[in-house]
Image: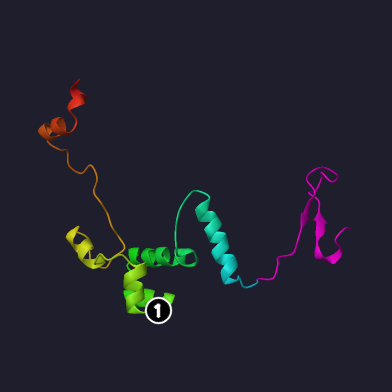
Amino acid sequence: MAGGISESLTRVPGIAGTQFEMKIKPPRQAQEWSYSSHRESIGKALSSPGIRYNKKAHINCGSSARMAGNVCANVDQIRRQGRWNNITINGAYLTNLPRELVRLMAGFPAYGRFFYLARAALDPPTSLCEKLFPAIDE
């Protein structure tokens, strides 16, 4: 068999000798990804659709911090997870909006993961519908 011990040829039962033969290779050992390789691959991924970004190696840090904030994770926990200090996390990774206050003002609990918006619970007045959608009567 070509490849010896490092790979084996597996045949699908009943259809040996057809195009359904496939090579199965053992998984590679995990290797640390160098900073330059990481930065270069993200740069290529961003530049192909024309996105300009100056912090290529840290692009995922902000989104992970914001995702944690969206599920009501404590800022201290987010900061510890990313090993950021107060200035760094507030200036670069989280939004400047006070999350708890925004939730409270929108009518949701300050800390909670269950947000329910009652849609179509009330029928709007006909006068409002006529103002919003004047072409409906035509």
- In the rendered structure, the answer to whether residue 132 lies left or right of residue 60 reads left
Work out whether 72 lies above or below 106: below
Residue located farthest toward the left when viewing the structure as drawn: 127
Q: Quadrant of residue 75?
A: bottom left
Can you say which quadrant of the picture contains the N terminus? bottom right
- Magenta region: which residues? 1-30
Between 68 and 89, the residue placed more toward the observer is: 89
Question: What kind of secondary structure does the magenta stretch mostly adopt?
Answer: loop
Q: Is residue 134 shown above or below 11?
A: above
Question: Quadrant location of residue 126?
Answer: top left
Give whichever of 48, 99 is nearer the camera: 48
Q: Is 26 covered by the magenta stretch?
A: yes
Q: Is residue 138 left or right of residue 70?
A: left
The residue that appears at 27% across and 54% down in the rendered structure is: 116
- Residue with the most extreme right position: 1
Residue 101 visible (yes or no): yes
Residue 73 is at least partly visible in this image: no
Q: Please give the name of the residue rendered at 26% of the width and 68% of the height, measured from the top-left corner.
A: 111
Who's the residue at 82% across and 45% down the image? 14
Check residue 44 for magenta coloring. Answer: no
Q: Amino acid at mark 1?
A: Arg
Tell me where residue 113 sits by quadrant: bottom left
Front-most of residues 20 and 3? 3
Query: What kind of element bears circle 1?
Result: helix
Residue position for label 1: 80
